[in-house]
Amino acid sequence: MSDDDRDFPASLRDSVRETYGEPASHPGDESWIRYCEGELEPHEVESLQDHLVTCRRCAALVQSVESFVADSSASGEAPRSAESAVVWDSLRTKLGPPAPPLEGHPSAWQRTWHKAPSVYAVALAASLLFVAGVSTWGVLEHRRYARLIRPQPNPPTPALYAESERGSSPVLVFEPGTPSMVVRLTIPGGVVPPYPSYRMALVSSTGRTVFAGAIDPEDGAHTTFPFVLWRDFLDEANYTIRLVGLGEDGEELLEEFPIAVVDGR
Amino acid sequence: MTWSQKRQPTTKVPPELVEGAVRDFQRGIEPEKRFQIVYDRYYLPIQNFLRPRVFSPEERFDLTQESFLNIYQGLGAFRSDGKLDTWVFRIVYNCYLKWLERQPGGKKAVRTVALNEEGASAQWDPPRSASHGDDLSPLSRVLDAESKRLLRDAIDELPKQMRRCLLLRLYQDWSVREIANALHLSAETVKVHLFQARKKLRERLGPTLVVGGSSGGARG
C-alpha cells in the first residue's frame, strides 16, 4: 500500500466498487494493444480510458501488455538459465528455414561484409581520408563520396521510373561518380490489392539475388514503391526487380520489372 | 531452480542489438544466430506472462516453444516501423488464447481464473449488493442507496483525468506507477490528481463520505 491509501479508507474503495458496476461489453483485445502502443486517435483513447477505469478484464489485459513491454526492455539473459537453455535446445531443432524465403541466401557482398566488417571499415575510412585529403575535386566531390558511405533518406539523384508495362526495359544510367539512384516501381492504381507489407528483390540474369529487403509504398494507394540502388553493388548487366506482396495467406509475386544497369559516358 | 521460481538477475540486451538482429534475420544473414538474440530478449517476458496463467510446467514449455516458433516464422514479415515488443506480445497472447480454447471448460471459464491470478489488483471479490442489502433495515437501505448516489455524483463531477486516476486507484486498486503507465501520464501528475480528487470529495461529501454501512464506514 502506498502513502495515498492513508486518505482512502477501505470502505470508500468498497463503496466505489459497489457504485460502479462492471461493463457488459468490452473493446476488442487488439484495441487495447494498440492503445498501449499509442497508436489510437485521441477520441478512441478517451473512450477506452473511460471503459478501463471500471473494467477488471480490460484492466488486466492492459497491465499484461505494459508488464510485457517493461520486462522486454529490462530483460536479456546472460548467462542463459538452465530452463531457457533447455527450451532453446528443443526449439532450434524445429526452426527450419525462416519464412518468407524470398531472399534464399544473402548476396555475396552481404556475406563478405558481415564476415569481415572491420577490414571493410578500415578500407572505407582510409578511402575517405584519401578523398578528403588529396582530391582536387573540391567540396562537391567530397559530398558525393559522403553520400556513398552514409545513405541519405532522399538523395538528390535523378529518379528513374521503372514502369510496369511488360516488354519495356528501362535503362538505369549511372552518371560518372553517381553513387546511388532512387528508383520508383510504379504499378497502375487499382491493379494490386493492398498488402500488409511488401518486399523487393533484385535478381541477376543468372538468377542470383543481389539484394532483397522490405519496401514500403510511398502513397496510400499502394502503387508506387521507392528504393535506392547503389552503384558499387551492381555490375553493368541486366537485372529483374521482383515486387512481392506479403499477406496473411502467404506471399504473392506482384510484378517483375526488367532493367539494365549501364555506366554513363 | 524450478520453473515456478522467480527469474535470476540478467544483463539487459540493448534494443539496438535486437533491432540489428531482426534486420539481419530479414536479410537472411545467419538467421538462427540472430534469432537467438530475439529469443534471449523475450524468453523471460514470455515466462512472466505465462507463469501466473499456465500452471503446468510441461504446458508452459509447449506454449513457450509454440510462441517462439510463430515469432520465428513471422519475423521475416515484421515491419521495421512496427513495435517489436507488442508484436511479440500479440503472438504470445494469441497462442495463450488458443491454448485456453483447448482447455476443458472452454475459454471463458479458464480465462476468468487466469485473470484472477493477474496480481493483487484483480484479487478482490466484488461485493454482492443483494446479500449485503438483506442484512440492512429498510431505513439503512435507503440511506445506503442515497450515500452511493451522492458518491457517484461527486466522482462523476470530477475532471476527466482526475476521475480516471481516482477510479483506477479505488476501483482497480492500481498503484500510482501503474496508473501513470496506463494513462500515459507522469507519476507526479497522477499524485496531484489523486490529491485534488481526495480534497474535492472531502469538500463535496464531508461526513457523508461514510458509505457502504456494512464496512464500518470511514470519515474523510
Image (tube, rainbow, N blue to C red):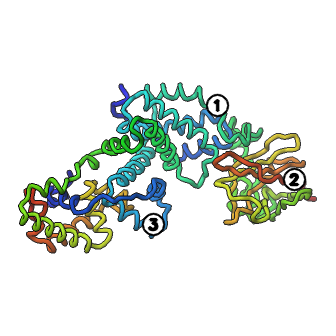
User: How many callouts does the rendering have?
Assistant: 3
Q: Chain of mark 1?
A: A
Asked if disc 2 and disc 1 are in contact, CB closer than 8 Å, the reply is no
Q: Amino acid at mark 1?
A: Gly
Towards the viewer: A132 or A182: A182
Image location of residue B22, percent across then percent down: 60, 44
Q: Residues within 10 Å of mark 3 (few under 14, many from 20)?
A: few
**Is A121 situated left or right of A87 in this image?**
right
Q: Amino acid at mark 2?
A: Pro
Earlier-in-chain disc, 3 versus 1: 3
Q: Which residue is mark 3?
A: A44
Image location of residue B35, percent across then percent down: 58, 37
Nearer the observer: mark 3 or 2; the answer is 3
Towards the viewer: B62 or A143: B62
Image location of residue A221, percent across then percent down: 70, 65
Q: Chain of mark 3?
A: A
From what the image shows, is residue A82 above or below residue B142? above
What label sits on residue A96 in the rendered view? 1
Q: Which residue is mark 2?
A: A258
In this view of the protein, can residue A2 be seen by the observer? yes
Q: Quadrant of residue B220?
A: bottom left
Labels 3 and 1 share a subunit: yes
Labels 3 and 2 share a subunit: yes
From what the image shows, is residue B136 above or below residue A42? above
